[in-house]
Image: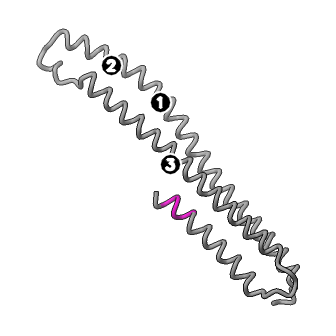
Amino acid sequence: MNGLDNKELTTSLEKHYDAVIGNLKELMLSKFEGIREAIIKSDAYATYRDAKQNEFQGALNDAGKRATEQEKTFASKTDVANLNKQFEIWMSGMKQLQEANFNVLSDSLRDIKIDMEKVKNIKQGGNQAWLILIAGGSILIAFITLVTNIFIK
């Protein structure tokens, strides 16, 4: 195989895996950092919205006291509270989804690292075809897991 012995091939594959894992880790960390920033911004917006909601509800209560036909068409305090609860449930689900995706990615990276350790421990004179098959399979499994977790959910 291009004059490489098993040790050189193993070292080459380790460097390649380290580069691939490093790139995947950077990509996922940047994605998750973007998600974290979005959550922080949404939490700040939720606080702002709550203050404005209280102001709005106060205006609705005042309008209700005047009891004109136009003022009766405003949303009730119960409706606004229900919408607020639904939003909070949705935000909680988004945070759980982010944590779940991060955990799956971490598990996949750990599995790849274990596979790399197995490749590292292959003795000289071993079958190089199996070495390449294990490396390719690991990369394929990691890629499928990554795509599944990002695009399917």
Alpha carbons under labels 2 and 3: distance apart: 32 Å
Query: Could you tell me which secondary element the residue under label 2 belongs to?
Result: helix
Q: Is residue 35 above or below residue 60?
A: below
Mark 1 Cα shell of 10 Å, populated few (<14), some (14-19), many (≥20): few
- Three-letter code, disc 3: Leu
Q: Is residue 106 above or below residue 17?
A: above
**Circle nearer the N terminus (2, 1):** 1
Horizontal side of 3 relative to 38 (left or right) equals right
Dominant secondary structure of the magenta stretch?
Answer: helix
As for residue 4 lying within the magenta part, the answer is no
Q: Nearer the viewer, mark 2 or mark 3?
A: 3
Q: Which mark is residue 45?
A: 1
Front residue of 40/127: it is 127
Q: Residue at x 61, y 57 (%)?
A: 105
Q: Which mark is residue 56?
A: 2
Circle 2/circle 3 CB separation < 8 Å:
no
* Residue position marked by numbered label 3 in the rendering: 97
Horizontal side of 96 relative to 16 (left or right) equals left
- Three-letter code, disc 1: Tyr
Q: Which mark is residue 138?
A: none
Q: Percent x, y for residue 90?
A: 41, 40
- In magenta, the rendered stretch is 146-151
Query: Could you tell me which secondary element the residue under label 1 belongs to?
Result: helix
Front residue of 101/28: it is 101
Alpha carbons under labels 2 and 1: distance apart: 16 Å
